[in-house]
């Protein structure tokens, strides 16, 4: 009789997989984590270059109002007091984000909240019904000027689709404020782990066998009893109900030698349709790092190809959600395979949400 080498094979070393691995190890289970990439941490992976921690897959600002999650993560890493206050660059003009009185004041040369409210009310008067898509939702929230200056071009680039074809929920992620408060998030806690994110995953996976550059679908695998799968769910089922759409992007990381401060802010969004990238990230501003050089990253949205591209964001429109529901019903019948995380649950999770979901998953399952 062949002996099972591992109780659990965990596919993906991002938050969901690493948390499950850590909890299962505490329960005395034999766990092997595999990841198709050459590093742990999923899209949260950070890499140190010239003393600066680069967010290799786009900016990750941790934010939560969940006391439990905040306590949990602070036992693993210490946070700095970084607050995201990005700026938008529209054809060279700079606007404050998220949409707040600084934005409205610059756009309309006004000073008071009631002036902003009146302009937005006039510009959004055509939307009297419940918004059916991102365009309608955006116009209802902030009016046509903000929509055309700061939302339309960015959204088209980011998602490769007209905003009228995207779900309204995407734009509801952003606060709209009639105060001069440009904090991008409303959460109680916010910051960046001092020393980057990768150490957090190193700690979670301490003492656990991790096999990198190992693709669940192509590589030789060890023997195992059960699987926790955190990759795209459609791939797991051989796309039998069709491909799910995920958004993806490419990053161009660039060292600017002898430039100590390139753009003066961690995140600059380019909101017109002509500039080919969506944002430039200047990583040292996440760290408050003083150094002679700087690293910046351009984010280029690219078309997603199943099995080839790195999936980043689920596109939760009605058609995709319907396909996902079919995969989910298959997943629910599995006895030895469990699914979790942004890609497997096809959910636009933020970091704190996936952490909460993984911890809850482990609490609820007698694995
Ligand atoms: N968005 C926009 N202009 C901006 C920033 C965001 O129109 O300058 C819209 C866009 O549709 C984007 C959505 O708001 O997909 C959510 O933005 P968020 O910053 O939450 O996306 P993330 O980068 O965190 O995935």
Image (spheres, rainbow, N blue to C red):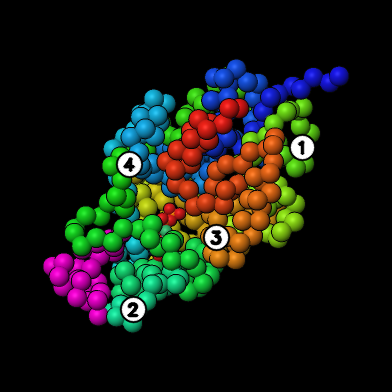
Q: Which of pointers 4 and 1 indicates the residue nearer the eye?
A: 4
Q: Quadrant of the C terminus?
A: top right
Label 3 to label 4, Cα distance in Å?
Answer: 25 Å
Dominant SS type (magenta)? helix
Task: Indicate which disc residue 219 carries.
Answer: 1
State if disc 4 and disc 3 touch (CB < 8 Å): no
Which sits earlier in the primary sequence, circle 1 or circle 3? 1
Residue 151 x, y percent position in the rendering: 39, 68
The answer to whether mark 1 and mark 2 are in CB contact below 8 A is no
Q: Which residue is mark 2?
A: 128
Of marks 4 and 1, which one's residue comes earlier in the chain?
A: 4
Up-down relation of residue 223 to residue 107 (above or below): above
Q: Residue at x 20, y 71 (%)?
A: 117
- Residue range of the region highlighted in magenta in the rendering: 95-122
Q: Which mark sits nearer the N-terminus, 2 or 3?
A: 2
Q: Secondary structure at mark 4?
A: loop
Q: Nearer the viewer, residue 22 or 312?
A: 22
Q: Quadrant of residue 170?
A: bottom left
Residue 14 vs 107, above or below: the answer is above
Relative image position of residue 104 (x, y in whole percent): 23, 68
The residues tagged by marks 2 and 4 sit, at their Cα atoms, a distance apart of: 32 Å
Residue 302 visible in the shown view: yes
Q: Secondary structure at mark 2?
A: loop
Q: How many C-alpha atoms fall within 10 Å of the one at disc 2: few (<14), some, or many (≥20)?
A: few
**Label 3, on which residue?**
315
């Amino acid at each position: 009789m062949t002996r099972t080498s591992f109780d659990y094979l965990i596919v993906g070393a991002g938050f969901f997989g690493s948390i499950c691995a850590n909890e299962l190890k505490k329960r005395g289970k034999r766990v092997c984590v595999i990841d198709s990439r050459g590093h742990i941490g999923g899209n949260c992976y950070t890499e140190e270059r010239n003393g600066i921690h680069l967010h290799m897959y786009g900016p990750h600002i941790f934010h939560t109002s969940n006391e439990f999650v905040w306590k949990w993560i602070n036992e693993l890493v210490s946070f700095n007091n970084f607050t995201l206050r990005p700026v938008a660059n529209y054809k060279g003009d700079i606007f404050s984000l998220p949409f707040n009185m600084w934005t409205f004041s610059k756009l309309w040369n006004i000073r008071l909240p009631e002036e902003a409210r009146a302009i937005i009310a006039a510009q959004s008067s055509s939307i009297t019904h419940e918004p059916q898509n991102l365009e309608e939702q955006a116009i209802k929230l902030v009016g046509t000027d903000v929509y055309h200056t700061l939302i339309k071009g960015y959204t088209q680039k980011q998602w490769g689709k007209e905003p009228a074809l995207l779900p309204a929920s995407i734009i509801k992620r952003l606060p709209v404020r009639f105060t001069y408060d440009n904090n991008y998030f409303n959460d109680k806690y916010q910051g960046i782990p001092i020393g980057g994110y990768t150490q957090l995953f190193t700690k979670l996976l301490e003492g656990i066998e991790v096999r990198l550059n190992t693709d669940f679908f192509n590589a030789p695998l060890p023997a195992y009893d059960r699987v926790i799968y955190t990759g795209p769910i459609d791939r797991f089922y051989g796309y039998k109900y069709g491909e799910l759409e995920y958004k993806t992007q490419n990053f161009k990381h660039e060292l600017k030698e002898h430039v100590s401060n390139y753009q003066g802010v961690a995140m600059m969004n380019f909101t017109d349709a002509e500039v080919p990238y969506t944002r430039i990230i200047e990583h040292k501003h996440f760290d408050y790092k003083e150094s002679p050089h700087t690293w910046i990253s351009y984010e280029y949205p690219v078309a997603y190809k199943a099995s080839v591209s790195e999936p980043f964001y689920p596109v939760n429109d009605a058609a995709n959600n319907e396909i996902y529901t079919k995969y989910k019903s298959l997943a629910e019948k599995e006895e030895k395979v469990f699914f979790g995380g942004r890609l497997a649950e096809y959910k636009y999770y933020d970091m704190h949400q996936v952490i909460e979901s993984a911890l809850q998953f482990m609490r609820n399952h007698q694995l």
